[in-house]
Every structure is written in structure tokens, then in C-alpha cells.
Image (cartoon, rainbow, N blue to C red):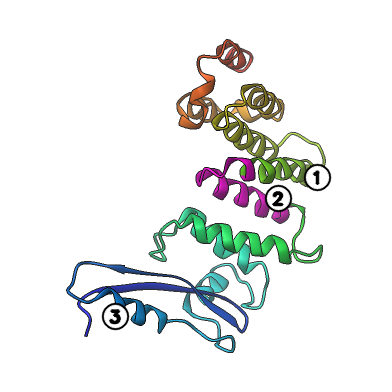
Amino acid sequence: GFKRHHGYAFHARGPQAFVVHATVQEKSETSGDAIKAALQGLALDAAAKPALLVWVIAKQQAMSPDDPRLLLATGQVYLSGNERMRQQKNLLMAERLLERAIKEAKPETYGPDDLWTLHESMGLATLEMRKLDVAIEWLTKSEQLAEKATEGAPGARNGQSAYNLACAYALSGKPDEAFGALDRCAAKGFLKETGNIDHMKVDPDLESLRKDPRWEPFFKPAEAK
């Protein structure tokens, strides 16, 4: 009988189904207590079967609903949003799911590349939430994992992790550390992509570095090629 529209999504792993968020939209005269009661009624018990969204993700990625990597997959949906699933970005839920995925990660669960993706996603989630000290820790680990994933060879993963780490340092008011990360980023070939250079020059996360005398000279080697 509510005039409100209840939007909710479920994410689950195997039999451990759980509601990860519930939202209420549009105006009505329904009381706040009634709405809370309605939302609480959406909760699933521990014995419930996997719900709809996890099945969609599992089918799209050809994964078993019992696959622990679904925690990473659903975390990434929350991190970036998914228009096809009508799922908006939700950084808090991304952080929670990715943190759980990291805690449950085992050597047989993730290969080197997936393990890098897991930590990089966690770093991005906390970076966007401006949990900068936490983001620096995750992205530092991500950069180390990128090296292992590529066995020290130049690659996008290495440069991407270093770049995001530079953003976290710049936002934290640590220019020396930020330029150090940018140097590593460039050494991995990140500046070979013209689009990356263009993005760096307008990225608001790096705004604090643009008046630094090291900023313009940083791009000269890449732009001279």
C-alpha cells in the first residue's frame, strides 16, 4: 500500500544470501517507521538461497554462485555501477564486499592478475571515499602485486597502480611521494598513451601538483617523442 518506490538489490554467495542495500525513492505520506519496517522485512536469513543479482553476475561471467570470486565481481559492480543492471555506484558497499573478498582470498582463489585487481579496486574505492591513508596502503600493495603479475615487465597494471597512488599522495599533501609514484608510473610506460597525458593534466586529484616546479618537466620526455 505504500506510495513510495522501494529499490533494493541482493548480493549473495552460495547459501549465505544477504541484503547489501535498500533504498527508498519518491515522496509520499508514508511514515518513516513504516518505511523502516518495510525495508527490514526485505532481509534474508542465513539459510536463504542466492538472490537475483548474484545469479545475473554469475551468469554474465560464467561463474558458479558458490565461487568466492563473486565477492570481487559484485564489489566491482558497486565500485563502477552498472546501467544494464540498473545498479548505481555505491562506494561503501564496494568497500565492504572487497574487504571481505580480501579477507577470504586464498592462493587457489585468485591468480596474480585477479589478486592485483582485487587490491586495486579496494584502493580505488577508498580513494574515491577520500579515506586517503587507507587508500595509500591498498594502492601500495596493489603496485607491488602489479609487479608480480607482470614479472617486472612494463605494463598498464604497473603504471595504473602507481598513478592512482600518486593521486592519493597528492590529495594527502605529500608532493614528494606523489612525484615519486608518477616517476614509477612513467617508467612503466603509462605516458605512452596520449590520452593518459591529457587526463593527468586535468585530473582534479593532481591539482596540488600543478604549481610545483617538477610538474611541467615531468611531461617533456614523453611529449618529445
Structural distance between the alpha carbons of marks 2 and 3: 44 Å
Question: Helix, strand or loop at disc 3?
Answer: helix
Q: Earlier in the sequence, mark 1 or mark 2?
A: 2
Q: Dot 2 corresponds to which residue?
A: 116
Crowdedness near tag 2: few (<14), some (14–19) or many (≥20) residues, C-alpha within 10 Å: many
- Where is residue 26? Give x, y as percent: 22, 67
Magenta highlight on residue 125: yes
Q: Which mark is residue 134?
A: none
Q: Amino acid at mark 1?
A: Lys
Q: Residue furthest front?
A: 33
Q: Is residue 205 left or right of residue 169?
A: left
Q: Dot 3 corresponds to which residue?
A: 34
- Residue 161 sits in quarter: top right
Q: Dot 1 corresponds to which residue?
A: 148
* Image quarter of the C terminus: top right
Residue shown at the point (60%, 37%) measured from the top left: 164
Indicate which label's residue lies in the foreground, 1 or 3: 3
Range covered by the magenta-colored residues = 113-134
Asked whether the residues under the numbered discs 1 and 2 touch, taking CB atoms below 8 Å apart as contact, a structural biologist would say yes
- Where is residue 120? Give x, y as percent: 64, 48
Asked whether the residues under the numbered discs 2 and 3 touch, taking CB atoms below 8 Å apart as contact, a structural biologist would say no
Question: Helix, strand or loop at disc 1?
Answer: helix
Residue 190 in sight in this render: yes
* Image quarter of the N terminus: bottom left
Q: Identify whether 116 is placed above or below 38.
A: above
Looking at the picture, tell me which residue is in the foreground, 27 or 31: 31
